[in-house]
Amino acid sequence: MKFMDWLDERLAVRQLIKVMLTEYYVPKNINFLWSFGVLIMVVFAILVVSGIFLLMYYKPDSHLAFDSVNKTIMMDVEYGWLFRHTHAVAASIMFLVLYVHMARGIYYGSFKAPREIVWITGYILFVLMAATAFTGYLLPWGQMSYWAAQTITTLFEKIPFIGPDLVVWIRGNYIVEDATLTRFFALHVVFLPLLLIVFTAIHLYAVRIVGSNNEDGIELTKEEKKHGKGIPFWPVFMAKEFFVISVFLIFFFYLVFYQYKFAMDPINFTPADYLQTPTHIYPEWYFLAFYEVLRGFFFSQNLGLIAFVLSMFIAAFLPWLDTSPIKSGNHRPLYKILFFIFVADFVFLTILGKLPPTGLYAWLGFAGSLVYFAFFFALPIISRIEKKKLEGGR
Amino acid sequence: MKELKILLILVVVVLVGYWGIEPYAHSVMHGEVKKPDYNYSDLKTTAATTGDPAKGKELFVANCASCHGLKNDGINPGMDKNAAIASFNVVPPDLSNIAAILDHKFLAAFIKNPQQATENPKFAMPPMAQLSDEDVGHIIAYLSSVAKKNLDGKEITIEACGRCHSIKYQKIYAETPAENLKAYLGKVPPDLSVMGKAKELEYLETFINNPQNGLPGTSMPRLGLTKESTEKVVAYLDQIADPHREQRNKLGMWVIGYLVVMVGLTFAWKKKIWKNIH
């Protein structure tokens, strides 16, 4: 205890623990979906640790990368395979956890005032995570690594005036080559993780200020939470969180040991070859929905690209699209229906994104893209309907 | 109860998505993999598949040994490796064990017409039109009599694939130089080190049985391996591509067992902390 006193005098740790944990209250009426924020931190920690171990043997050089991953790490280094499997599966599952976290925010209206900053920083984190995943996917230098990078960097060509020069600038060469691999490596292991940590700090700080939303979307004051309507973050909330983490880890490690193929596509075990385009090029599953918007929108490359950019960023503007005074989907029958149509549509687009864009699939993809945007453009309308209803009720 | 309902929705959404991007997408992209045909029933030949080994040896020395050696019986090829590469862009195989790994009907059809049997019009060996149906039988009988039995997967793989394919993670390098293979086949054949991971095993079996069934238009010749040799090659490629499988399966059980205990402990702790919270 003496040591605690000593620390407390210098760092005010007791006060810190109170503010951050024991007297930080979260509402009682939240379900396990509110545990996904901490789950994301857990997955991020797993990625950092496994990534550091991979970094010790990986060679960011187009002649060495494939063998350093598939021979050195996967075969020669003791338990090297474990770190690669863990890293690959964690990268994939990160997006599952992120999507659940975001969907919870959308359904319960957690993006609404006063939590706009929480939503925006969260959205920036999602985009940064997408960039981290994309740059990381090039590193094993397999066929799909190569062609995914080639395809996605080509998209920038369509930007007016600077497009073609921009593509060369990004790649550091006229095609994806050694220079591209080295700079993606730098972004993946230093720059992007650094930004992720900075924005995570802002995101968490903002949550501490405005507090968590809850199932009913009715704001609780600190006093209300202190006296019956809330639970302290430590130990009460975290007691449940540890249980959720344990269950999640069973699922996670089951994938790592027995079902890793979805995160390590067989085609990526063929070394990159710029002379041989694979029959089917597709991104990892978490980008498939946006990819489907890209290639299906009005069957036009230019419109597809615009729609793709819009589909990636439109959700960031949710706080200003949905201005309804009611927060939670539980109390918004119309919104609830729209939300579940949106979720179904996102899964639908994800599936179509991997299928060949021909015949019926192309038309279904186009229809799915329209539904995707329809959700966002319907929000101002139902907000107005709900406002009118509220005013009429008074 | 309410939380279980939410969990159920979550699980259903994830499973539908998984089904769509894995099993369903794969079935659409790759279609049905054709079954291998180990009877080589498309090959019609009247040539015999057995005969007198002694006569076979004489015929072998007269007709085959100018290009092919047969180490098991002390026969060296008439031309050395470099001369063969210069003329054919590929090393002719030593035929010591060929009868142990190839189907004999295929072998008979192959000797008569290699281009047809391999389904590769540019196959380097010329048809042996001078041999009668009985002669072919004698040669096959001779080859069978000298061939080593019970070759393992690695030996078969080197015999069947090693003239063109490297397996560099196993320090096995193609006998024929890459530039000659490129001239012969149009491209350098892929390294087989992690082929067992790059392709489904079922596909590999079909592909080895008849490359045209897996990759129409490929310049890889059909090899005519027996069912047993094909399976041994596939098992070998699988094993070298994933050498830590046993360790992984074992460790997986420990990790998941440990986490099951964790779930029990954390659940008990949660119960204790939440006892007075309603």
Image (cartoon, coloured by chain):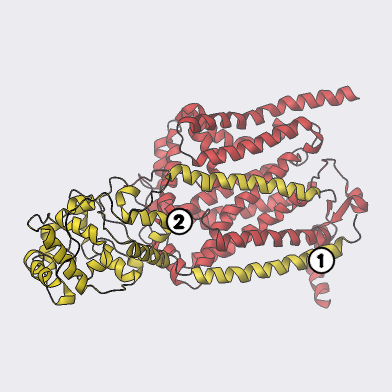
Numbered disc total: 2
Residue B123 visible? The answer is no
Left or right, B30 with respect to B250, comes to left
Q: Which residue is drawn at 80% across and 47% down?
A: B2
The reply to whether the C-beta atoms of the residues labelled 2 and 1 are less than 8 Å apart is no
Q: Position of residue B153 (x, y in %)?
A: 35, 69
Residue at which label 2 appears: A139
The quadrant in which the C terminus of chain B is found is bottom right
Q: Quadrant of residue B163?
A: bottom left
Left or right, B112 with respect to A98, comes to left
Q: In this view, does A166 lie above or below A227?
A: above
* SS at badge 2: loop
Q: Quadrant of residue B235?
A: bottom left
Numbered disc in front, either 2 or 1: 1
Residue at which label 1 appears: B269
> Which mark, residue B192?
none
Q: Where is residue A334 in the image (x, y as percent from the top left)?
A: 76, 30
Q: Where is residue B71 in the image (x, y as percent from the top left)?
A: 17, 75
The chain letter under disc 1 is B
Q: What residue type is labelled 1?
A: Trp
Q: Residue at x 58, y 57 (%)?
A: A90
Residue A56 visible? The answer is yes
Label 2 to label 1, Cα distance in Å? Answer: 42 Å
Which hue belongs to chain A? red
Q: In this view, does B197 lie above or below A387?
A: below
Q: Where is residue A253 in the image (x, y as percent from the top left)?
A: 61, 62
Left or right, B78 with respect to A110, comes to left
Q: What residue type is labelled 2?
A: Leu
How busy is the neighbourhood of tag 1: few (under 14 within 10 Å), some, or many (20 plus)? some
Q: Which residue is drawn at 41% across and 41% down?
A: A167
Specify the chain shown as yellow: B
In depth, the one of A108 and B45 nearer the eye is B45
